[in-house]
Image (spheres, rainbow, N blue to C red):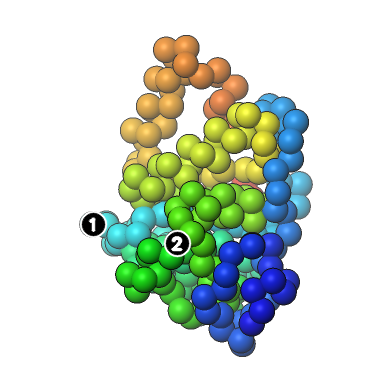
Amino acid sequence: MDAGRGLLYPGRIASASPARAGAPGAGSGHRAGVNAATVRPPMSRPASICVFCGSSLGRDRDFRAAARDLGAMLARAGCRLVYGGGHVGLMGVAADAALAAGGSVTGIIPDHLRRAEVEHTGVTDLVEVADMFERKRLMIEGSDAFVALPGGLGTIDEILDVVTLAQLGQHAKPMVIVDLKGYWRPFASLLDHVIAEGYARAGVRGLYHVVADLEAAAGVLRLDG
């Protein structure tokens, strides 16, 4: 498949599954000048949703089940799943579930991870980029909304980048943090502490949604209609 045909991403496609080939969802690019207070749930169903989650499976099997359920949910809703391109961890579970349910999946992976053979070769589109910074930029630009499941430092970094860019008025896309079994409670408390200490405005809380489960996340993103 030609790297420049039908793709929002200027990276090189490392591999693609012809049977599932298709263009990523609309909604890329920064919207300069958006006031942070305007970030709201989408007025219509997002065409593409970026999933942030662990590259490890973690200890709790319920989180693996949630990753499977999220991937299948996005496929049923007709939303393209955009993610970090690996076959490992919760991210691989979510991608596999979306593909198994007939959905479209775009993976964006840095060259050094592809060379380490952690890329998912069965996704609809696999876009190879130079480094982690470009990977994150393209995931953010090429998605209409974001959902975070449990994950590690990379997932935390991705959430904070999305929220910070919204605070700076660079986009107005919803960020949904799924607080499964209280996993993200300490993180949410840290953000509250930052606000309480005067290092962020209280309005920052309006830039992300913390929900208890996937059903609530679907409601925020209008996937349940």
Q: Give x and y (percent) for residue 214.
A: 50, 54
- Using the numbered discs, state the Cα–Cα distance from disc 1 to disc 2 in whole angstroms: 26 Å
**Number of on-image labels:** 2
Q: Which residue is mark 1?
A: 59
Q: Is residue 202 above or below residue 63?
A: above
Three-letter code for the amino acid on which mark 1 is drawn: Arg
Counting from the top left corner in percent of width and height, residue 138 is at 59, 54
Tell me if I can see residue 77 in this picture: no
Can residue 138 be seen?
yes
Residue 128 location (% of width, % of height):
51, 67
Mark on residue 110?
2
Give the residue at x 40% y 70%. Answer: 114
Occupied quadrant, residue 78:
bottom right
**Residue nearest the observer in this picture, 83 or 126:** 126
Residue pushed farthest left?
59
Is 112 located above or below residue 99 in the figure?
above
Q: Residue at x 38, y 27 (%)?
A: 189
Question: Disc 2 residue type?
Answer: Pro
* Mark 1: few/some/many CA within 10 Å (<14, 14-19, 20+): few
> Helix or strand or loop: what does disc 2 sit on?
strand
